[in-house]
Amino acid sequence: MSSAPGWLRPERHGIYLPGTDCWIDPSIPVARALVTHGHSDHARGGHGHVIATGPTLSIMALRYGEQPSADRIDYGDTIELGDGTNATFLPAGHVLGSAQILLERQGERVVVTGDYKRRPDPTCAPFEPVACDVLITEATFGLPVFVHPPIGQELDKLLAALAERPDRCVLVGAYALGKAQRIIAELRARGFSDTIYLHGAMERMCALYEAHGVPLGPLALVADATLDDLRGRIVICPPSALSDRWTRRLPDPLQAFASGWMRVRQRGVQRGIELPLVISDHADWEELTGTIVELAPQETWITHGREDALVHWCGLRQIRARALDLVGYDDEDEH
Ligand SMILES: [Zn+2]
């Protein structure tokens, strides 16, 4: 195979398939968009036609209203895009409904990972590895320093902090799509059955997860609780609300933040975080490099992240690699 298939073109605003007039995760409104998952840096409003999984379409409907035109595609299903190009959506293990997209044309296979992780997550289907000629991978945490600890280790810290301070609450900043539900589901899996309190911005996304078959146990809104109700409780809010006056209604909240960025201690200090929790829905360095080895592509294209280290790593292993200059994929709070 040549160094890159001509039927696939990285543009500033997404991956473009010129023969089909389709884009993947475009950051501007387009006529036909294939969307890997519901995070707002991948799923934008305003497209003419959207091709995505059912949960991703539900998430987009929640945020932008119903799409004017859409194809719902299940994991493992293949859709003909035209120009002899087929797309198959496969689980990416990132958030509910998240997909990798396998593109095939005349025997060439390209996998666009979207955002992904390889760790188990009770709220979404696990990443399904597929061998390919070209791998287009994310690299949000593409530096060797980013090795995410097991989630159980981080949740043990959270539960210990809660037990030590029965008069306070632990306020966890967690992105409203994916991170919040994963933390809740993982706590339930550990037998934590107390009511978990939510900022109002979390309510509809948690209900959407439950409607798609992800049970989250007893939840209540902070707005409906008294100060005493919240003592000794876990409260979850969007990261932006951690420094909001909204926190004044909580009993002396201990501030926690769940993010892969908490691996860098200074990031937590800057935000005034007392309890940094290194919990990420993205592949860490080991997962990124392990996946490249497993999928054995001839060429790797690296998007939206810290590309340089991964390009260098590929070079040492005789894997052709290039960094794509995509814009608009850098909302750190979502990671
Ligand atoms: Zn994402």
Image (cartoon, rainbow, N blue to C red):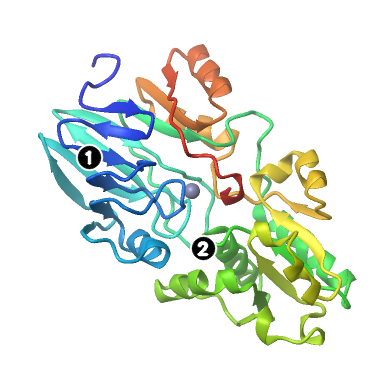
Toward the viewer: 197 or 14?
14
Q: Is mark 1 within 8 Å of ligand 1?
A: no
Question: Which residue corresponds to mark 1?
Answer: 22
Near mark 1 (Cα within 10 A), the count class, few <14, some 14-19 or many ≥20, is many
Count up the numbered dots: 2
Q: Residue at x 31, y 40 (%)?
A: 24
Vertical placement of residue 86 versus 174, above or below: above
Near mark 2 (Cα within 10 A), the count class, few <14, some 14-19 or many ≥20, is some
Residue 232 horizontal/vertical position (percent) = 81, 77
Q: Which mark is residue 157?
A: none
Question: Which residue corresponds to mark 2?
Answer: 122
Residue 19 horizontal/vertical position (percent) = 15, 31
Would residue 253 appear left or right of 99 to someone viewing this image? right
Q: Using the numbered discs, state the Cα–Cα distance from disc 1 to disc 2 in whole angstroms.
A: 32 Å
Q: Amino acid at mark 1?
A: Cys
The local secondary structure at tag 1 comes to strand
- The answer to which quarter of the image holds residue 25 is top left
Would residue 179 appear left or right of 265 to someone viewing this image? left
The local secondary structure at tag 2 comes to loop
Q: Amino acid at mark 2?
A: Pro
Q: Residue at x 84, y 72 (%)?
A: 163
Q: Residue at x 37, y 34 (%)?
A: 13
